[in-house]
Amino acid sequence: MQENQTKLQPIKVQGRLEELETLRLIRNECRFFMTRHTSEIQPEEQKWWWDHIKKEDYTVFLYYVDKVPVGYGLIRVENGVSWLTGGLREAYRGKGLGRQIFIHLITQCSNITEIWLQVRASVSIIRVCAC
């Protein structure tokens, strides 16, 4: 597949159990690539996290290709800075979808002067201009 042929459909996570489980499974598959915390998250930990975050500080999306969940993206606002993180299932990497995820996340940030992209050192950083 070429980048311009594959379109992601973003769905904002509302906290339904099936959404949280999908988020957990994708995050666990991607944990060695795009997060600081590499331990596997269990279902009860995912639910606890969702129940205890300040919802006004977090926006979470699941991304689909042809109704198949392929990735997630998260925006966390802290002290006026938007922190972005996300993950993409291995079978969908190298197709430009990660770039689409982060461009979408950036467009969801409002009144921003800084965006920080959180990745592991072993992963190349996507250069974006948003401000």
Image: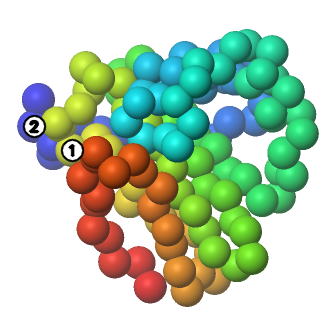
65 lies above or below 18: below
The quarter of the displayed image where residue 68 is located: top left
Which residue carries the number 2 mark?
A: 2
**Comparing marks 2 and 1, which lies closer to the viewer?**
1
Label 2 residue SS: loop
- Residue 57 is situated, as x and y percent measured from the top left of the image, at 78, 59
Of residues 50 and 96, the one drawn nearer to the viewer in this rendering: 50
Looking at marks 2 and 1 on the same chain, the residue that comes earlier in the sequence is marked by 2
Residues 15 and 114: in front is: 114
Could you classify mark 1 by the number of other residues whose Cα lies within 10 Å: few (under 14), some (14-19), or many (20 or more)?
some
Say above or below: 35 vs 130.
above
When asked about the image quadrant of residue 49, the answer is: top right
Q: Which residue is mark 1?
A: 96
Residue situated in front as seen by the camera: 4 or 82 = 82
Is residue 69 in view from this perspective? no
The residue that appears at 41% across and 30% down in the rendered structure is 32
Residue 27 location, x and y as percent? Answer: 52, 27
Could you tell whether 87 is left or right of 91 in the image?
right
**Hey, which residue is sitting farthest left in the picture?**
2
Instruction: Check whether the beta carbons of the residues at disc 2 and disc 1 lie within 8 A of each other.
Output: yes
Q: Residue at x 21, y 44 (%)?
A: 96
